[in-house]
Image (cartoon, helix red, strand yellow):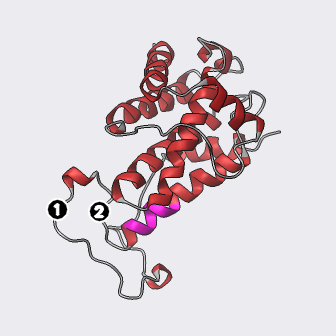
Amino acid sequence: MSLDELKDELSVLLENSQIDDETVRTCIDTDFVGKLEGPEIDFDGVENHWERVIELLTKVIHDENSDDIISKLESESNLLKKIITVLAFAMEKQKDKTGESCLISLAAARMYFLLSCLNSAHVYGIVHKANVTRAFNSVKTAYQKKLLHEDVRPKSKKSGKSKKNATGDISSLPPTQETEVELFSSEIVESLSSSLFNV
């Protein structure tokens, strides 16, 4: 069952991030507005694990997204609030504008959008305007790096120098087959559109 696997993987994600309750409480109380204050979280090597979480979230949304889905996921107190706090810190990494930070923030944005698609996410305090903005900025930064032909891969896999647009202005670059990025399936986009700001 995807839901049980997802719960296990979310618990592992929290254990690896070691986010403290005080940081979570502060972020929730301020609705994630402004610069996030808290301990430095090490996101090295999380990509594969986070891709697994994204895969499981997608399956749960397609197969098991009922009105009580969030209460089924809450295996511990405030599990999802802790998760979205970790994701908010990860999405802040896009400000570093490196290939590796873009990967981390993009994965966090994808996960955040998927969590926002869970039924009643807005009721349970998953959707925060500041985090939605962070998620869109993460996608935008990764897309801009791709348009500028920079590697959006971890540093260890980076090969050669990246090509940059001479002016640094990406608005004049036409989209090509190579630069189009499909982050979500059409079903996820439709679900996101209909449920993200459902109040």
Q: Residues within 10 Å of mark 1 (few under 14, many from 20)?
A: few
Q: Is residue 49 left or right of residue 184?
A: left
| Residue at left offset 48%, top offset 51% | 93
Q: Looking at the rendered structure, which numbered label has been put on residue 107?
A: none
Q: Mark 2 vs mark 1: which is more N-terminal?
A: 2
Vertical relation: 80 (above or below) 163: above
Q: Quadrant of residue 56?
A: top left
Q: Which residue is mark 2?
A: 151
x and y percent of residue 116 in the render? 64, 37
Vertical relation: 109 (above or below) 141: above
Rounded to the nearest angstrom, the CA distance separating label 2 from label 1 is: 8 Å
x and y percent of residue 195 in the render? 71, 40
Q: For residue 109: magenta?
A: no
Asked if marks 2 and 1 touch (Cβ < 8 Å), the reply is yes
Q: Quadrant of residue 45?
A: top left
Q: Residues within 10 Å of mark 2 (few under 14, many from 20)?
A: many
